[in-house]
Amino acid sequence: AVCAGWGTLPVFAASPSSKKQSRFRLWPRRAKEQLDELEQPPKRILLARHGESEFNRDGRFQGSLSGIMKGPKLTSEGHRQAKAMGKTLSSCFDWDKDVQVRVSPLRRARQTWRRVRPYLGVNKKQAQAWGELREIDLFEWEGQRMEDIRSTYPEQWKRWLTEPWSM
C-alpha cells in the first residue's frame, strides 16, 4: 500500500499486483464534493485497483463504454490477486462497522470487491457503487490491443503517455 496526503486526509492506494505500477487518476473537485455530502467524512481513504482482467492479460485498453454489466472479467490470476489483497488489507486497518466503501460500478472492480470483502468483515450494505470511480471512456480504443493503437495512432499514443488527462 502506498500512502499520500490529500489535504489533512490520508489517502492509501493498493494494487493487487506488485509486478506493474498503476496510474491512479482522481477528479479531486468531484471527489471532494462527494466526500462533503457524506454524513460522516472518512478518516482515511483507501484506493484499490482491480485484479488482472482479461483485457489486462491481453494488452487491451479497457475503458468503460462496454457498460457496467459487461466489460472484461477478472482472470483466475485477478481473482487470486483480489484474495491476496483482501488478506493483506485485513491486517492493515481496524475494519469496524463504520467503514464506508465506494466501488467503481464496472464489472472488474465489483468482482475484485466481492473477493476482498469477506476478509475485511465489511457488510455488503456498507458498499455503494460510485460512478465517479469508473474508468474513463476510451471510445474507439476500447478493446483494441495497445500495440495496434501505438502503430495506428502514433501522435495520440504519445499524448496518451505524456498527458492522458487531455485525451
Image: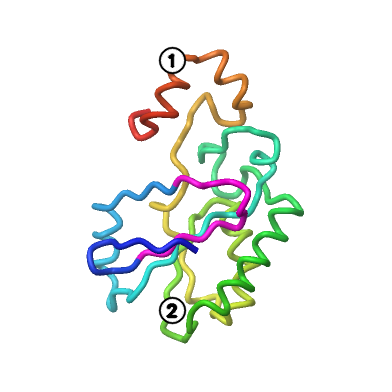
Magenta residues span 11-23
* Mark 2, residue position: 99
Residue 69 against residue 36 in the figure, above or below: above
Q: Which mark is residue 46?
A: none
Q: Which residue does the image show at 29% across and 72% down from the upper left?
A: 38
Question: Would you say 163 lies left or right of 105 here?
Answer: left
Crowdedness near tag 1: few (<14), some (14–19) or many (≥20) residues, C-alpha within 10 Å: few
Residue 92 against residue 51 in the figure, above or below: below
Measured as percent of width and height from the top left, residue 120 is found at: 57, 78
* Mark 1, residue position: 155
Measured as percent of width and height from the top left, residue 6 is found at: 28, 61
Residue contact between numbered discs 1 and 2, judged by CB atoms under 8 Å: no
Q: Which residue does the image show at 23% across and 63% down from the upper left?
A: 7
* Inter-mark Cα distance, 1 to 2: 44 Å
Q: How many marks on residues?
A: 2
Measured as percent of width and height from the top left, residue 103 is found at: 48, 61
Label 2 secondary element: loop
Residue 50 against residue 126 in the figure, above or below: above
Residue 7 against residue 94 in the figure, above or below: above
Amino acid of disc 2:
Val
Q: How is the image coloured?
A: rainbow
User: Does the magenta portion include 152?
Assistant: no
Amino acid of disc 1:
Glu
Q: Which residue does the image show at 62% across and 54% down from the upper left?
A: 17
Q: Which residue does the image show at 44% across and 21% down from the upper left?
A: 158
Which label lies toward us, 1 or 2? 1
Crowdedness near tag 2: few (<14), some (14–19) or many (≥20) residues, C-alpha within 10 Å: some
Magenta residues, dominant SS class: loop
Measured as percent of width and height from the top left, residue 41 is found at: 28, 74
Task: Locate the C terminus and report the quarter of the image it occupies.
Answer: top left
Name the residue nearer the viewer: 133 or 79. Answer: 79
Name the residue nearer the viewer: 117 or 155. Answer: 155
